[in-house]
Image (tube, helix red, strand yellow):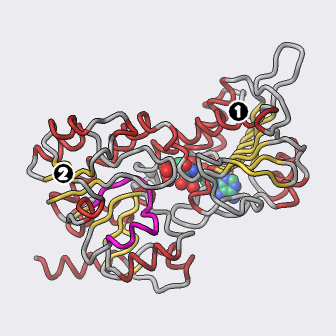
Amino acid sequence: MIIGVPKEVKNNENRVGMTPAGASTLISVGHEIWIEQDAGIGSGFQNEEYLAAGAKIVSSAKEAWSTEMVIKVKEPMPEEYQYFSEGLILFTYLHLAPEYELTRALVEKKVIAIAYETIQLENGALPLLTPMSEVAGRMAIQVGAQFLEKPKGGKGILLGGVPGVSPAEVVIVGGGVVGTNAAKMAIGLGARVTLLDINAARLRELDDQFQGRLNTIMSNPYTIAEAVKRADLLVGAVLIPGARAPRLVTEEMIANMQPGSVVVDVAIDQGGSIETIDRITTHSKPTYEKHGVVHYAVANMPGAVPRTSTIALTNVTVPYALKIASLGVKKSSIIHQELAKGINVIDGKVTFKAVAEAHGVPYSDIQQILNDYHKVSV
Ligand SMILES: NC(=O)C1=CN([C@@H]2O[C@H](COP(=O)(O)OP(=O)(O)OC[C@H]3O[C@@H](n4cnc5c(N)ncnc54)[C@H](O)[C@@H]3O)[C@@H](O)[C@H]2O)C=CC1
Ligand SMILES: CC(=O)C(=O)O
């Protein structure tokens, strides 16, 4: 199969969908990699390294998109929709629930759109989201600490305090991968940390893991309001896979926070979990202020640490790309059921229920589509 890797075009997105090592793996079993010139530069990978791995360097995005499968990092930007074509396999983060126009373009052009973030193992794990959630969770505390500084608009406190002065209060809503990694960093820096989740079993695991250094609370509107009121730094880290993020923190709760407090809504890529987050921000202008509270809502946080993120991401995407390229989308999804869950759009149909519901469009069962394919192909 010919696989295209375009250069990312989202604001300050320096990750790339394929490393030279990944290219070499795919090429070694007979596939071709067409990578757009300089696509790897932001992550520290030179064109020569891809050439040495056997890849072809193409000079335009159009050429990289003119292949059978496109592997990238972020959801296509509107200027990329022109490259969609019938039967093209698009393997990338998509976050379609809050993106009606993108969903419509993929359906109309009959692209086969496989979203990294909805590939799900039987035990519920999201193997292609996990590494970037690890990065974003850790970054949430790093950026939160930075924006608590006075010159950055914050209230001017140090996360860990100093002897004789209280540390900051960090509140994390959601105790999955982002939440756990944020807790690790915040505790490591000496902050007082409270984490809320609706899953009692998860809270039990975290209580064991952090050995009493993490305050775990069952999440509901009452406990969220109480915790948010005290927070110097609030991290939004909830997820209902594939669905729009639930708006758990209301405007009233934010208005009750002290001026100069900071909110980092990591769940912004699924539409955001905080009512006052009314826009996606970018790495070039990451924050805005509302009710005196600094709001950070960057949807591609790992893009700021592209070297770490590209390697971590491609460690998990390349094995799946190999399966898709070698067997085709339908066959590989029948054999590896987690891939079937990644298919959000195929043959002009929306096959991820939460996405169809978010946009009020018809939903088609992917298992039915795969069964029909199986019947014809055997
Ligand atoms: N902005 C960015 O650059 C990035 C954003 N993300 C996003 O971060 C979000 C979280 O991702 P993960 O931690 O990997 O998900 P996860 O599935 O590991 O964890 C989500 C947690 O939210 C909890 N939850 C669900 N409803 C809740 C509620 N009402 N109250 C409290 N907790 C609730 C779940 O029980 C689960 O423990 C996702 O939207 C993901 O796409 C991930 C990486 C980068
Ligand atoms: C998960 C995601 O959207 C990102 O890493 O940018």
When the figure is inspected, residue 157 is found, relative to residue 126, above or below; the finding is above
When the figure is inspected, residue 239 is found, relative to residue 370, above or below; the finding is above
Q: CA distance from mark 1 to mark 2?
A: 40 Å
Quadrant in the picture for residue 334? bottom left
| Quadrant the C terminus occupies | bottom left
Q: Residue at x 22, y 59 (%)?
A: 324
Q: Residue furthest top?
A: 163
In-image side of 156 versus 320 (left or right): right
What percent of the width, then of the height, locates residue 318?
A: 27, 47
Residue 121 within the segment the image draws in magenta: no
What percent of the width, then of the height, locates residue 135?
A: 52, 38
Of residues 288 and 173, the one drawn nearer to the viewer in this rendering: 288
Q: Residue furthest left?
A: 30
Mark seen at residue 146: 1
Q: Residues within 10 Å of mark 1 (few under 14, many from 20)?
A: some
Residue picked out by circle 2: 33
Part of the protein shown in magenta: 70-83
Mark seen at residue 223: none
What percent of the width, then of the height, locates residue 71?
A: 30, 56
